[in-house]
């Protein structure tokens, strides 16, 4: 269901949220929560790698994106201009409406973790982008992915 088609009113949502919080608080009083440990892989073990030049030789058509680019590796190529414009509109859709979802607020949140974001790509591969440009690019791509997931969910 798209955001525009949601049938749950704010009152219903808030009522359901309060009911859930009340039940959750009661459950917490009755039982102590189990200890939870989540292992997050370090950036050094998982990176978005580029295809090595030896493998790409004479095979660019296999490795290069055709419809759109996500992330910095193919960003800015002319063949993706139309989709980049669409992604910008999608970003504005996702970050408009409330002060908490303001574009600059969201970009600033990305900037707080920009070094970590850079660490997920091959060393030096993001150097052509200043921190602000990379943060906006990642935010834009993230909103596009969410939009696409919403479209796929609507199909079901």
Image (cartoon, grey):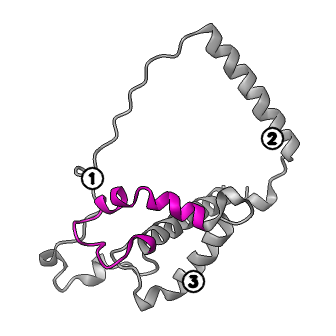
Q: Helix, strand, or loop for circle 3?
A: helix
Residue 59 occupies which quadrant of the picture?
Answer: bottom left
Q: Position of residue 17 (x, y in %)?
A: 76, 34
Residue 136: image location, x then y, percent: 49, 70
Report the Cα–Cα distance between label 1 and label 2: 38 Å
- Does the magenta portion include 115? yes
Residue at image location 36% in from the left, 79% down from the top: 74
Q: Residues within 10 Å of mark 2 (few under 14, many from 20)?
A: few
Q: Residue 8: which disc?
A: none
Q: Earlier in the sequence, mark 1 or mark 2?
A: 2
What are the residue bounds of the magenta stretch? 104-132
Q: Is residue 34 left or right of residue 152?
A: left
- Which residue occupies the foreground of this view, 126 or 5? 126
Instruction: Determine the CA span between mark 3 and mark 1.
Output: 30 Å
Residue 13 disc label: 2
- Where the C terminus falls, by quadrant? bottom right
Residue tagged by mark 1?
46
Q: Which residue is mark 3?
A: 85
Q: Nearer the viewer, residue 132 or 10?
A: 132
Between disc 3 and disc 2, whose residue precedes?
A: 2
């Amino acid at each position: 269901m798209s955001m525009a088609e949601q049938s749950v009113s704010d009152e219903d949502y808030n009522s359901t949220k309060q009911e859930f919080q009340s039940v959750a608080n009661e459950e917490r009083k009755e039982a102590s929560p189990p200890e939870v440990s989540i292992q997050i892989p370090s950036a050094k073990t998982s990176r978005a790698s580029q295809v090595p030049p030896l493998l790409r030789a004479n095979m660019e058509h296999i490795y290069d994106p055709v419809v759109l680019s996500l992330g910095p590796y193919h960003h800015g190529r002319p063949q993706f201009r139309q989709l980049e414009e669409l992604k910008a509109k999608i970003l504005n859709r996702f970050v408009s409406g409330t002060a908490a979802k303001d574009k600059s607020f969201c970009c600033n949140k990305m900037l707080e973790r920009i070094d970590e974001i850079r660490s997920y790509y091959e060393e030096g591969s993001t150097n052509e982008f200043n921190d602000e440009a990379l943060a906006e690019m990642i935010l834009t791509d993230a909103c596009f992915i969410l939009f696409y997931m919403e479209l796929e969910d609507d199909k079901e």
